[in-house]
């Protein structure tokens, strides 16, 4: 009769080695994928705030606006087109959040208050994110009182 060779390593040790190997493989896959998404596939190139767009391009970018203005945030990316998120804040309160996909490495979003008073006077900012919702860049602006001519 043929005898089957038995290993001198016990099952609990084998299972422990398999678990460690599986964990290491998972960590390596996560690290490679994470690095590729943030630095290889696409990245944030430029963020601008403006009141007017022409052919997806800001006409004048600036950092101070009037309450009745429509305010656009334009994000240019580098690399392949992909998802970009924008979170708009008034002071420390998030007032809007959206995620879309760039088209030709550009995406834009805007805020406007249609009431007679317009947007509240104060400080605003937009957080830009592409991976896991962590902000990669922020742009700051303010709404100032309407100036009299």
Image (cartoon, grey):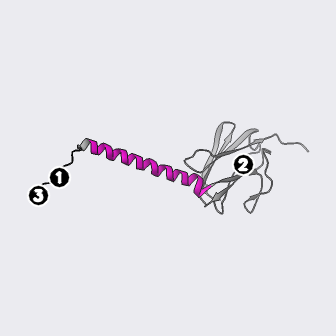
Q: Which residue is mark 1?
A: 5
Marks 3 and 1: CB-CB under 8 Å?
A: no
- Residue 144 placed where, x, y %? 80, 40
Q: Secondary structure at mark 3?
A: loop
Q: CA distance from mark 1 to mark 2?
A: 76 Å
> Which is more toward the observer, 4 or 35?
4
Within the magenta stretch, is there residue 33?
yes
Q: CA distance from mark 3 to mark 1?
A: 9 Å
Number of other residues with Cα within 10 Å of mark 1, as a class: few under 14, some 14 to 19, many 20 or more: few
- Viewport quadrant of the C terminus: top right
Would you place residue 147 above or below residue 47 in this image? Answer: above
**Outermost residue to the right:** 149
Q: Which residue is mark 3?
A: 2
Q: Residue at x 21, y 45 (%)?
A: 8
Q: Secondary structure at mark 2?
A: loop
> Which is more toward the observer, 32 or 115?
32
Q: Residue at x 50, y 52 (%)?
A: 32
> Which is more toward the observer, 4 or 16?
4
Q: CA distance from mark 2 to mark 3?
A: 83 Å
Q: Residue 19 bears which disc, if any?
A: none
Mark closest to the chain's N terminus, 2 or 3: 3
Magenta stretch bounds: 13-42
Classify residue 126 by image quadrant: top right
């Amino acid at each position: 009769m043929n005898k089957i060779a038995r290993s001198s390593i016990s099952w609990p040790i084998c299972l422990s080695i398999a678990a460690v190997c599986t964990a290491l493989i998972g960590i390596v896959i996560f690290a490679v994928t994470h690095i590729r998404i943030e630095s290889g596939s696409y990245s944030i190139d430029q963020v601008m705030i403006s009141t007017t767009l022409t052919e997806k391009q800001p006409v004048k970018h600036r950092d101070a606006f009037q309450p009745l203005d429509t305010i656009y945030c334009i994000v240019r990316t580098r690399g392949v087109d992909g998802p970009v998120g924008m979170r708009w804040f008034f002071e420390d309160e998030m007032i809007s959040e959206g995620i879309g996909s760039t088209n030709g490495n550009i995406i834009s979003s805007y805020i406007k208050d249609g009431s007679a008073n317009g947007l509240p006077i104060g400080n605003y900012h937009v957080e830009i994110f592409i991976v896991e919702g962590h902000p990669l860049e922020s742009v700051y602006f303010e709404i100032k009182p309407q100036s009299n001519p």
